[in-house]
Amino acid sequence: MFYGEFIHSIDRKGRLILPAKFREVSKNNFIEKFFITRGLDKCLFMFGEEEWKQQEQKFKAASFTRQESRVFNRIYFSGAMDIIPDRQGRILLPQYLKDFAEIKKDVVIAGISNRIEIWSREKWVEFYGNWRQSFEEIAEKLIDIKQQ
């Protein structure tokens, strides 16, 4: 549903404008509300409301008697907030999420199918630089796993 990489900047009021392509996808899929939280690899995850509910059910099903489940759920859900973009498609990123993702000014907004990831531009360049050479090897492993 969400695809592509876009470079944007945080404005002086701490707002980020969603790419026009993502606003169009949201409109066409009747997504008015999003949920944003701490993601993995130092980025932020942003889900449409229905996708968020599906993800939430999966994580809530994890046993709270396991320490890893408790820790993950605490960090993931305590960082979450619901947001509704304004008419210009802007969202306000809270400072604690910007701090987590080390976002200062320039960001990369990446569509990852069912979610949007928001990265500091520096962290995205680092991530991409570290993993692009392994992309084909990873693909081969994932494809082989699915075929077995």
Image (spheres, rainbow, N blue to C red):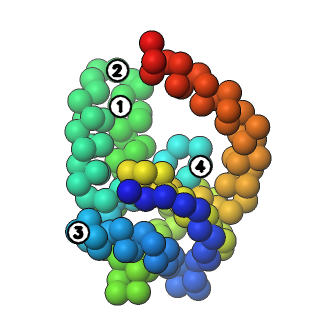
Comparing marks 4 and 1, which lies closer to the viewer? Answer: 4
- Asked whether residue 92 is in view, the answer is no
Name the residue beneath numbered marker 3. 30
Q: Label 4 near label 2: C-beta < 8 Å? A: no
Comparing marks 1 and 3, which lies closer to the viewer? Answer: 3
Q: Residue at x 76, y 37 (%)?
A: 133
Q: Earlier in the sequence, mark 4 or mark 3?
A: 3
Q: CA distance from mark 4 to mark 3?
A: 29 Å
**Residue 86 % position (x, y):** 35, 83
Mark 4 neighbour class, 10 Å CA radius: few under 14, some 14 to 19, many 20 or more: many
Secondary structure category for the residue under label 2? loop
**Residue 98 % position (x, y):** 55, 63
- Residue 54 position (above or below residue 123): above
Q: CA distance from mark 3 to mark 2?
A: 37 Å
Secondary structure category for the residue under label 1? helix
- Asked whether residue 140 is in view, the answer is yes
Mark 3 neighbour class, 10 Å CA radius: few under 14, some 14 to 19, many 20 or more: few
Foreground pick, 135 / 131: 135
Q: Earlier in the sequence, mark 1 or mark 3?
A: 3
Q: Which mark is residue 42?
A: 4
Q: Residue at x 67, y 33 (%)?
A: 136
Q: Residue at x 67, y 55 (%)?
A: 124
**Residue 102 % position (x, y):** 64, 59
Mark 1 neighbour class, 10 Å CA radius: few under 14, some 14 to 19, many 20 or more: some
Q: CA distance from mark 1 to mark 3?
A: 33 Å
Q: Which three-letter amino acid code belongs to the residue tagged 3?
A: Phe
